[in-house]
Image (cartoon, rainbow, N blue to C red):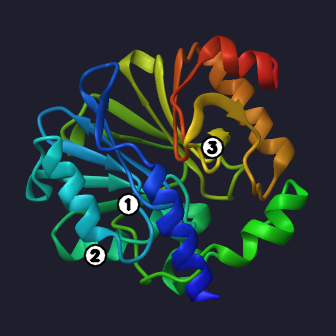
Amino acid sequence: MRAASALLTIAIAACAPGPTWVEPHHVGTVTLGLSNVHVLVGEHPVLVDTGSPGELDDLEAGLRKLGIALGDVTCAVVTHVHADHAGNARGLQLRGIKIIAGSGDLMRAINGDHGTLYPTSFFARFILKPLIPHEFAAFWPDIRVRDRYDLHACGVDAEVIAMPGHTAGSLVVLADGGKLAFVGDLFRGGALAGYVHRSEPKEHFYQDDLAAAHERIHELIARGVERFVLGHGGPSQRADVIRVFGQ
């Protein structure tokens, strides 16, 4: 099974774009084997998500291509504790970076196992699920968010808000006066893990609470979010998200 997972990662990585800057210009993306890691730049850089287990060196190299040294990063927000997003959280902690995660995902974090995945499609249940890693280095988040957290303390003009749905502890990062949202896996973009038609919104493969995840999407639309930065594929524009998920 590990061999199959490794082959999947290699195949997907071959299609992945290199590290990129996206609008607005203070947001960069490093696309790793199974997910995106984003960087929000201010007085200090802040990461959104950490990649899959074993990808810390790739993450550091990708940040370097964006002109960002990992040693300058102060905080990393884990949008939800699944292995492909929280896989390097402990490694970043050991580099002196504060890890911010949702209180609702605390048990997953300290157990180093994201537990049961609830598929939303046949493909997710029978083909993709066996290939996804579920174990990662356990960690105790430095900051555990129940409601919201102001990222000014980390050096950027942004805030973290709790938005349970994809997981019980899912977080969203709001920046640019609330017009820009880093939404983790509330939904995904594109096909083939987000490497084809990247900006097209699609239902994510797994949702702990599908109805709640849709409610969170509608809440973000109601807040006036214009651009959705995703854990897989993306970014997606407001009009496309409304077309797919409603308002």
Q: Nearer the viewer, residue 230 or 2?
A: 2
Q: Nearer the viewer, residue 33 or 235?
A: 33
Which residue carries the number 1 mark?
A: 50
The answer to whether 208 appears left or right of 48 in the picture is right
Callout 1: few (<14), some (14-19), or many (20+) C-alpha neighbours within 10 Å?
many
Circle 3 packing at 10 Å, graded few (<14), some (14-19), many (20+), is many
Label placed on residue 91 = 2
The answer, for residue 144, to whether it is visible in the render is no
Which residue type carries mark 1?
Answer: Thr
Query: Residue at horizontal 59%, vertical 66%?
Result: 105
Q: Would you name the residue on which mark 3 appears?
A: 163
SS class of the residue under badge 1? loop
Determine the residue located farthest toward the right in the rendered image: 122
Tell whether 176 sits left or right of 124: left
Q: Earlier in the sequence, mark 1 or mark 3?
A: 1
The percent coordinates of residue 78 (x first, y second) are 44, 57
Query: Where is residue 177 drawn, in percent x and y?
Result: 39, 16
User: Is residue 60 among what the camera can see?
Assistant: yes
What residue sits 20% from the left and 50% below the top? 63
Q: Residues within 10 Å of mark 2 (few under 14, many from 20)?
A: some
Q: Position of residue 17 (x, y in %)?
A: 39, 43
Q: Disc 3 marks which amino acid?
A: Met
Question: Residues under labels 2 and 3: Cα distance?
Answer: 25 Å
Question: Residues under labels 1 and 2: Cα distance?
Answer: 9 Å
